[in-house]
Amino acid sequence: MNTSITENCAETEENVGILESNSFNRKNIDKLDADLRQLVERRDALGPCYRLFYQEPLHLVRGCGTRLFDANGVEYLDMYNNIPSIGHSNPVITEAVTRQLQQINTHTRYVHENILDYADALLAKLPAEIDRVMFMCSGSEANDLAIRCAQLYTGGAGIIVTAEAYHGNTALVSGVSPSIGKDVAMSPTMRMIPSPDTYRLGTDEIGEWMCAQISEQIADMRRHGIQFAGVLFDSIFSSDGVIPGEAGFLKPVIDLVHKEEGLYIADEVQPGFCRTGEGFWGFERHGIVPDIVTMGKPMANGIACSAMAVKHDVLDAFAEHNPYFNTFAGNPVAMAAAQAVLNYLDGNNMLEHTRDMGEKLRNEVRKLMAAHPQIGDVRGAGLFTGIEIVQPGTTEPDRPLAVALIEKMRENNVLISLCGPYGNVLKVRPPLVFDATDLDIFISALDISLTAICE
Amino acid sequence: MNTSITENCAETEENVGILESNSFNRKNIDKLDADLRQLVERRDALGPCYRLFYQEPLHLVRGCGTRLFDANGVEYLDMYNNIPSIGHSNPVITEAVTRQLQQINTHTRYVHENILDYADALLAKLPAEIDRVMFMCSGSEANDLAIRCAQLYTGGAGIIVTAEAYHGNTALVSGVSPSIGKDVAMSPTMRMIPSPDTYRLGTDEIGEWMCAQISEQIADMRRHGIQFAGVLFDSIFSSDGVIPGEAGFLKPVIDLVHKEEGLYIADEVQPGFCRTGEGFWGFERHGIVPDIVTMGKPMANGIACSAMAVKHDVLDAFAEHNPYFNTFAGNPVAMAAAQAVLNYLDGNNMLEHTRDMGEKLRNEVRKLMAAHPQIGDVRGAGLFTGIEIVQPGTTEPDRPLAVALIEKMRENNVLISLCGPYGNVLKVRPPLVFDATDLDIFISALDISLTAICE
């Protein structure tokens, strides 16, 4: 299994743009209308690392709630973007940012209430054992620091991730993000376990299976003289194909990690902030307490903001010799935006809303399975859903159909994307303000799109 | 010289907070008034890596232009902060950010004009050979990516920096930032050259001296089987003590680097965006063309924004296998803020203003030298000035006096800081909107403060 996953590892969500099949192919630029063509050509100034979604890239000019509008005034239902979790252009963010910008925006070497108020509010959302929080600008920076803390605390270097993991873009974090691409050098002290593919492996013993995989990799590390430092897992395994698994299945896994004297770094960049509906954090579904928690994306609804929350003794191992300063991180403006998100989530019962709407969404998708046997599995937690597109009657991934489907959905004004080792899992992850009308639009578009392609 | 620098390397600006002598010492918390004490105690939630300036930390609540105001309404002249380069709370930033937040704030996988307009405007400020620009959230992320590009392009790993360099906080970049602290593990493929201390070494042959130092380190790399990848220099050597040197002295140095098949990464996080007054970029003073340019801090006046500009063939070596996505980077809001900064700098002749005000400032400080022989050297470019505090009649650094002086200046309502291998150089780096009234206030405060301490 590892081989096929590795062969396909360039095909996961975070770098879905690499694939000419579902990201814009520069060779097709002549097919674009003149205005769009000119804009896309101008992107050459950004160099070849940047990708655009869709064969006909989207030129978005306005957003509101779950909706996005292109330059021609066409409206799209956004079922993909998790950063604007409380909705595109939510006025509570504009207000909070504007008000703070008018006052002051400095750094953490001066005292300011915003960072203190937000730190308290954030720690109150975390298990009591996790009693320190530091701020960064990106999830990558948070994971970079988390790995260093785990390594200094344990004295080991060895980090275990899943085979399709994506944890960010710094040198250190890229080295533990196999989904970036098979030609990108991975860290020699990193080991991979296969994605916990509950659809193909079954769900009953997935925790036990995962323990066996981890034990095997720790043993391999030992043979290479590498001391185990810990695991870095996204508890909903987003880029592995959105795999919530049974609540609790990670419990024995993390017990094993601790028994082996490693740390559990919970990458909550995607599952955090109510996304999974069953808890404020994804790891809560499993009744486990991480040693380090990293977070980002939806934290301030698009204003650059991330954090590493950590047990104080773990942080002390880093802090003993390392000061840490991050120019923009934790500044009053970022903290005001983050606080506005937290207030919105709490004030609007977004956790409950997310759980309910997520269940409704998956129930409605399941109703389509009879008419559309290409839907092989529907799984998720809260408003994070994966839909396996397969060859009917089998679990064989149908990547070409999945690719065609996201393009067809876009024609039908709904934005989704793909993930998973085979690049065939629809990634459905709308802003949390997703409502019943949005659900109707999505289900109708999915039904119509599948029908149009398959029949 | 290397030894003494290394022994003192924890004492430079970027981690000035480590030193109990000029950052707040938690042991003295009882000396603070009740309100401030409570706030400082609450910072324990942030853990021990965070530092506060001053024995009595500043609780700042408002900023305007070059002025900052604390919770008691006390006004300070900010002669330290380079991030709010067009002034604290400049309304052009508030307007640009507010307007964009009301429209849309997404990521780079959709087409948006802001990033294209800004990329064009930024590249127009750079030498023609540098024809690609990518965006990040922090200077650390920009330097992290720059080093990886240099390594992939050259096939080497070896990076040379100065002994007091600070280039950021990721794992990779920390490893080439010796000023972080002598107990922080440096990269085994990094080599240091001493700070080009023109005050103590003389200025005439400093380029030649630096070439010899670099040759020595390249030879040492070769002995260790490390291939040279390049140098990472801040052209004004900020944390080395603000060392502009004679314009042009870096030319033979960079010629040597290229002859040795290494790249020159210009860390313009501090000297960029008109700071040095003699060119939009610090490296322009030297008539040299970098292979990679990194930038950050003042780029968007405090909104998280950084970039790596690069020659296309250097980027291609990275792009061949590596996609790159950075969630918040280059988003329409960050780009709107960055564009507003650029427009302000251009529209208000800030380069000329910076050059003129910087010269006036240094001239006025030099006039104080007769009355205050503790001022050993005054040097700088534009509004980036270093003032050596020494034992009169010698070049011996007087660190205790320098520390006392920044505290006394704060009592006199002027904020500055320290840098350099001996921690004795006053770092004077106001927002670029610094004017003649500000200059009078600064000179008067410096005069009064020196008198109060020394006489």
Image: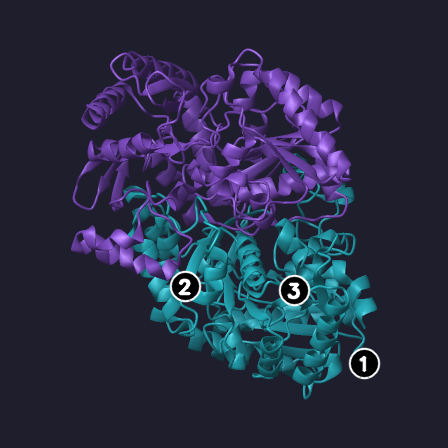
Chain colours: A cyan, B purple
The lab-note entry on whether marks 3 and 2 share a chain reads yes
Q: Which residue is mark 2?
A: A132
Depicted B343 relative to depicted B146: above or below = above
Q: Residue at x 38, y 23 (%)?
A: B388
Q: Secondary structure at mark 1?
A: loop
- Label 2, label 1: how far apart the Cα atoms are: 48 Å
**In this view, A6 is above or below B190:** below
Bin the neighbour count of mark 2 within 10 Å (Cα to Cα): few under 14, some 14-19, many 20 and up: many
Closest to the camera, between mark 1 and mark 3, is: 3
Q: Which residue is mark 1?
A: A394
Please determine if labels 2 and 1 lie on a single subunit. Answer: yes
Check contact, mark 3 vs mark 2: CB within 8 A.
Answer: no
Task: Write down the residue under mark 3.
Answer: A159
Q: Please indicate, yes or no, whether residue B414 appears anywhere in the rendered image.
A: no
Both marks 1 and 3 on one chain: yes
Q: Nearer the viewer, mark 2 or mark 1?
A: 2
* Chain name for mark 1: A
State the image quarter where residue A256 is shown. Answer: bottom right
Quarter of the picture holding the N terminus of chain A? bottom right
Q: Residue furthest bottom?
A: A204
Sequence-first tag of 2 and 1: 2
